[in-house]
Amino acid sequence: MSTHRILLVDDDQEALKLIGLMLRRAGYQVLTADSGRVALDRAVSEHPDLIILDVMMPDIDGYQILARLRQIPATASIPVMIFTAKTSVNDKIAGFQAGADDYLTKPVHPAQLISHVKTLLRKKQAHAFQVTEGRLIGFLPTKGGLGTTSLALNTAFAMTQQLAHSVALLEWRDGGGSMGLHLGITETGNVQTLLGWPAALLSREVLRDHMLHHPDGPHLLLSTPVPHGAGPSLTREFTQTILQSAGELYDYVLLDLPSALDEITLTVLNAASRIVLTLSPDRVGVAMAKAMLTELDKRAIEANKIGAVLLPRSAEVAPLDEAAITRTLGVTVLGIVPADAVLAHRSTERGKLMVKMQPEHPIAHQVNHLARTLLQAQGVLRDVSA
């Protein structure tokens, strides 16, 4: 099923059922409202991806609803399709003047409706994340405990050292955050603090005020170490708003993600220009990565933006052949970051990044290579190996 949610607004219950059925059969999640006031409330609270709006409503007509939606910051950018029996040219002009993105008349063939819906959703996604195009990188583990958070931290530092650009690293989870603990930072939970803000008031200035500027370069937005489920949950609207603001503030936005393919993670992965998939280079790790890639493919996440980083669990165990892993997974291996339990322990205990503690260590070389590879993929650095 698609992660896209559509708010269907019509006072005709039969129309709600019929059009809702068409949309659900096409795989969309459907929200409904049978009056203008309910529509406005649901648009603000649910922040759907698209609103399909009838004009002739008993309390507030569709044009008035649309005008109010465009005045509310939290709903101003939601695409709206007017879907009505009013067919005159003047009605259509009035609809577009009120701020409609599309105008479709009843009755309609299901294929025509779905075609218009798909077009509006594509335009929305392209617009919503245009500021982060080529600049948003998600770090996705195949399972917990691999060291993905440490990899994301050290890569963010390496990127800030290699070019004069601003880099942000967001610990995108609603609990169990360990990034602050890795760095010896006690001020964590800013993700949860921002979750308490009304959506309409979240701005890039508010985000900037809640970011921590690490002395080694990257700006950080940390989650709480309190277990998942003990605090407020991330929402898609919140995720989209923060990504948009972060993309306006920073040249590069990195996200440390959990391994669960829930709605929030998929929102990030859809927007990302590059996905770093981490796995253990052994039989079990490769099998789990294969399963993850299969699920990503089912959810239409483009394989060409996924690259794998191998994280061996022990220096004593030889990893599987890199070429064999590439053939099995069908994605490029971006690098192998060796294990060093002693260095990792010292890094955590001292609250310092591994690449900063021992810049000549093989781990530092591999992380710097990964940072260069990611930047070259965006056309920022020239490939000096050519």
Image (cartoon, rainbow, N blue to C red):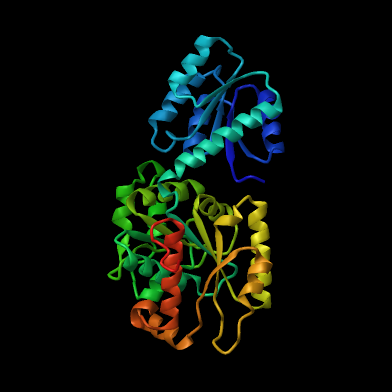
User: Which quarter of the figure has residue 85?
Assistant: top right
Q: Is residue 209 above or below residue 48?
A: below
Q: Is residue 359 above or below residue 138?
A: below
- Give the left or right position of residue 334, taking residue 112 as reference: left
Residue 131 % position (x, y): 40, 46
Q: Is residue 92 visible?
A: yes
Q: Which residue is rendered at x = 56% and y = 71% of the image?
A: 144
Residue 161 % position (x, y): 32, 68
Residue 54 % position (x, y): 57, 22
Q: Is residue 275 above or below residue 79?
A: below
Residue 176 % position (x, y): 49, 68
Q: Which residue is rendered at x = 43% and y = 64% of the image?
A: 383
Instruction: Count how many numbered circles sit on residues in the image.
Output: 0
Q: Quadrant of the C terminus?
A: bottom left
Residue placed most toward the observer, 371 or 299 = 371
Q: Residue furthest front?
A: 386
- Give the left or right position of residue 168, taking residue 265 as reference: left
Residue placed most toward the observer, 3 or 366 = 366
